[in-house]
Amino acid sequence: MAVAYALERRARPPAAAASPVPIPGLAFPRIRPLRALRKSTRLLLHPLSLGVIVGVALAGGGWYGNKVTSTDAFCASCHVHPQATSSWKKSPHYDNDSGVYVHCVQCHLPPGGLAYLGAKIRLGVRDAWTTYFGDPESIDWEARGQLEHAKGYITKSSCVGCHQNLFPISLSEEGDDAHLHYDQHSAELRCINCHLGSGHESHQESKRKKRAFATAEASEAKEAYTEAAHPDAFEDFRETIPGTSVAFDLVAVPGGEFTIGSPPSEPYRDDDEGPQRRVQVSRFWMGRCEVSWDEYLAFYMATRSEGRSDTRALSKTPEGVDAITGATPPYGDPSQGWG
């Protein structure tokens, strides 16, 4: 029986391979590798595609190149100044309580944009030329450290980009005076007028060289009044502010009476416009012109401590007094140059 079964299997024809059952609406595309390769090549060689590829490559290379050339180590590799790095590490921009490092490009280049790229190319070419083709030994570094030369290497926008608040709570009164003077003469002054050595001088050397620019005008040959005016009669006179060279004219305004309110018969009259009554005004003096900028500065200098909000001002508050107010540093010249 087993022999008969084996002969039957041997004689049985092999089963045909099962053909796939077609699915209505589904068709598989024929893949032609050579044609797909030719299409991809034509797409890559298209001018628009080539422009995108080249643009991305240039942008990536530019970003990486800018990153590499913006490090302090790269800057030092072209610096011919013998103590550029060592003096920077002694300065407040490196050795400070906050532990923040202010890097080369943050001071010597504008904050960003086309101005940043232009300044970087200009200074980079100059440093590289001096390093490889110039004569560093002949450079007068003392003269190069003066204000007029430093203006070409330090931008004001870089300073105020970091130091945006010129009147922080921790600022000393001397700093208040200096920053107020700078704020009113920012068109003529730069931050390095006072802080020339902040990037490459020690704390002690910087303090020795600083000047109190807020008192620059007071140091000029101007007569300072010793006392206020004392008018003997009710008439126009010139008032003076002691300790300053500021004076202003006052006009005598005689007293009198006038009627306040409107009569009930006035058209479109509101109820809060009456009743009418007579008001008497005593005589007084009034400034001939608006308060000048110099007058306000004298007022600010005399009352600035009351306008501060730090602990030094609060410690002076008498017992039982909730708060003391006073003049605060102005953020611009309200006169707009008109007087």
Image: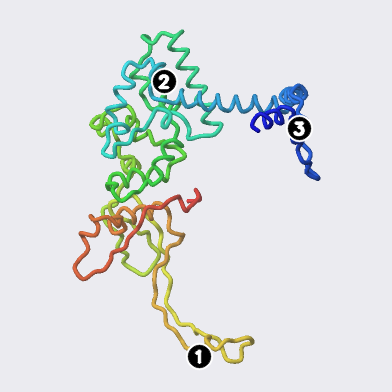
Q: Which residue is mark 3?
A: 16
Q: CA distance from mark 1 to mark 3?
A: 118 Å
Q: In the figure, 323 relative to 160: above or below? A: below
Labels 2 & 1 near each other (Cβ < 8 A): no
Closer to the camera in the image, 5 or 231: 5
Callout 3, which amino acid?
Ala
Image x and y of residue 188, in percent = 45, 37
Q: CA distance from mark 2 to mark 1?
A: 82 Å
Q: CA distance from mark 2 to mark 3?
A: 76 Å
Q: Residue at x 42, y 77 (%)?
A: 255
**Mark 3, other Cα within 10 Å: few <14 / some 14–19 / many ≥20:** few
Q: Earlier in the sequence, mark 2 or mark 1?
A: 2
Q: Which residue is mark 1?
A: 275
Callout 2, which amino acid?
Phe
Q: Which mark is residue 74?
A: 2
Q: The residue tagged with tag 3: helix, strand or loop? A: loop
- Asked where in the image residue 62 lies, by quadrant, the reply is top right
- Asked where in the image residue 127 lies, by quadrant, the reply is top left
